[in-house]
Image (cartoon, rainbow, N blue to C red):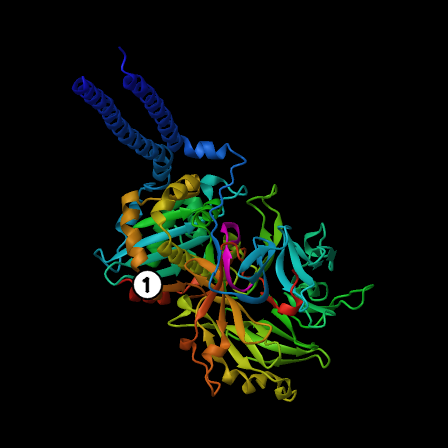
Amino acid sequence: MQIDIKQDNQFNFENTEKKPKRHLGCFVILFILLLILACIGYFFRSYLEVIPTLFAVTQQAVPRTKAEDTIKYQYTGSKYINILLLGSDNDAKFDPSNVLTQTMIIVSINIQTNTVNMISIPRDSWVKIDGMSGGYGKIDQASGLGGLALARQTVEENYGVHIDYYAWVGLQGFVKVIDTLGGVDIDVNHPVIDDVYPNDINGSNPYSAIRLYIPAGMQHLDGTTALEYVRSRHGDLQGDFGRSARQQQILLALKGKVDKTNIISEIPSLSTDLGSSVRTDMTPQEIANLAPLLIKINSSNIHRYILSPPDYGVNGFSPDGTQDIVKPDMTKIQTLINSLIQ
Amino acid sequence: MINPRIERNEKPQKRKGCLIIVILIFLIILALCFIFRSKIESHLPFLNINNSKSSTNPSYNLSGTLYFIRNKDIWKISGQNASQVTHEKDISYLDVSTDGTEAVYSVVNTNESDLFEMNLQTGQKNQLTNDSSKYLDSNFWALAPFISTDGKSIVYLSDKSKLTYSNSDLSVFTINMANTTTRLPHEITHGYPYTGGDQNPTFYPGNSSYILYTKYIYAQDQPQPFSKLYLMDTNAMQSYALTPDFSGTYQASFSPDGTEIAFVKRDSVSGVDDAQNNIYIMPFSISNLSAANPESAFNASYVNAVLIHSGKDAYPVFSPDGNKLVFYTLNNNQFNISEIDLKKITDKNGNVNIKTGKVNVVLNTTGIDTTSNLSWIDPSTTIN
């Protein structure tokens, strides 16, 4: 009897032990399945939200013009990657399909020596523009006349630099990029006071103005203040050239920021935020390939140039006397560019 | 006959079954949350995700009280604790009186700013300037106030000189606080147009006739203005250059006894792109100022300036006993408040070796406003 009971007990004991084991096994499998489901869900959500925006921002190829195919460049080979950075005042004052490029910076990356040259072209540079009445105009008008293709062609024809890629950013896009990266840390070289800064982003009247003050010294700028810093042109005697220098300064600070930020984790929010505010013809893969290269480049190997008077031209007036222009000294400019990109 | 053990074992199985169902539901909800996370968050207005990190250095004990601006409010550090003093969300450019009772600051609005004083014990506020107007060009800035040691004068920046000179930028102004009926601002300097104007005005300790400030100036054929330090004798209305042209010196403050000046200097390593904002200290004596040669007044002091800290720094301020220096420094994409013990970097002969000094992180947090002065108050005047 005792033995039976013992056997019975053993039987019962085994029974009660085996069933939970099965449950435990099922539970583990279910847990893993649900974990996988959660991960798939997460990536599916990311895909749903990010990928379309990512592709809306990137791969926005602008067909090359016929004239671009005939341009002869000073250099050949794949030593350089040249990116044309374009910035536009795309506020309510302008037709979105006909914006001027207030900012034009050629970023030339030497992938062999890991050096970068940033060359800012003043927006008032009086250059040959295909299709422009009289043949010449301010370089910022090229995009308004023939879109980004003509802007790129104009830079290539006048400055002899083959542009591999372009990247365009509007006002809101600039603010969003900076804010998504958590702001930018800048040494403001001198205080900026601008009594007629355009109030065209948040105000009800895009033609109105506000007063602006940014103190000197090391400080953290959010996207809006950073935009004010790079856009103000009444805060010093240099006007447009002064802000070109500040734009390059912000680009350098952003590079430093990206170096220390896990940029991969920011890509979803960047892509979601940027929407119609940023465009480039680079593919996500090309950006992914370029990012580590840029991070590797030391700040001391990034050189800044502004093609402004008196070194690279003279201030003057358009032939009809109606516009303030910069007459570029193409001989000096070409000598500089040949020394940088050869 | 029913085995009692079998009966007892059925209930746990049911419980486990329930538990599994609960976990299943939880995991499904978790999966759904992953999928619709952004939507859920955006529809929860009460959900406030605060990712900001804030930490005082547990091994550092600050003697006295250090006031600073964080997220548009006054904060203070006492001992090892950082705490919020105000909840105004509109405060910029702070200074606190040496007895710790009064704070002066700017409230910056679109187009203009005004000065306020606040009793730090009662929280009572008093507006000192009124520079707002519905007409854009009738608005003015009132910025960066600094209280004299005796609390009777305030020096600050304003562009109100535009009323006289249309193209003037920020200039140094003073207000006599002792006169409670009429506190008319008095213009002391004239900021150069298109430089942004003068910056960082402070009084000489114990004598509000002398004002130290940063001036931005254009040199001939130079596209960008450079900064240098000046001292203004307001009795003689004579200014003295304390640093040379192109020195890139700014954000200066006196030691409590007035014998030293700490300042920031832009030092270029291999070009403007990697310039450092380093902290220096130079000796100072009013008796060395010569009205005969005011633009060379720096010869007696600047040549003896010594590097104290190298980095992306801002606003060096002496401790109340003059033995330490506190400043903002950029570290890993975030501004810290840091301190350096000047005694530990100075040998018996008075020579400074920065390698022997350890920089103590006083506070590591987000939202510190590095455009505002730091105010370090003597322990005996600390407000609890």
Q: Pinpoint residue A316: horizontal percent, then vertical percent.
A: 50, 63
| Residue B44 falls within the magenta-colored stretch | no
Question: In front here: A71 or A285?
Answer: A285
- Local packing at callout 1 (Cα closer than 10 Å; few below 14, some 14-19, many 20+) is some
The residue sitting at the front extreme is A1
Q: Using residue B347 as the reference point, say whether residue A208 is left or right of it.
A: right
Residue A149: % across, % down: 36, 45
In the rendered image, the quadrant that contains the N terminus of chain A is top left
Numbered disc 1: what chain? Answer: A
Query: Which residue sits furthest top?
Result: B1
Q: What residue type is labelled 1?
A: Asn
> What is the magenta range?
A215-225
State whether residue B244 appears in this view. Answer: no
Determine the image quadrant of residue B3.
top left
Do we see residue A145 in this rendering?
Answer: yes
| The C terminus of chain A - image quarter | bottom left
- Snapshot quadrant of residue B149: bottom right
Residue A40 in the image: above or below residue B227: above
Rendering coords of residue B181 (x, y %): 83, 63
Q: Position of residue A160 (x, y in %)?
A: 31, 58
Q: Is residue A216 magenta?
A: yes
Element class at badge 1: loop
Q: Mark 1 points at which residue?
A: A298
User: What residue is drawn where x is 21% and y is 56%?
Assistant: A77
Q: In this view, does A295 lie above or below B230?
A: above
A76, B127: nearer the viewer: B127
Q: In which quarter of the image is residue B73?
A: bottom right
- In the picture as drawn, the residue positioned furthest to the right comes out as B181
The answer to whether A127 appears left or right of A94 in the picture is left
Q: How many marks?
A: 1
Q: Is residue B33 above or below residue B268?
A: above
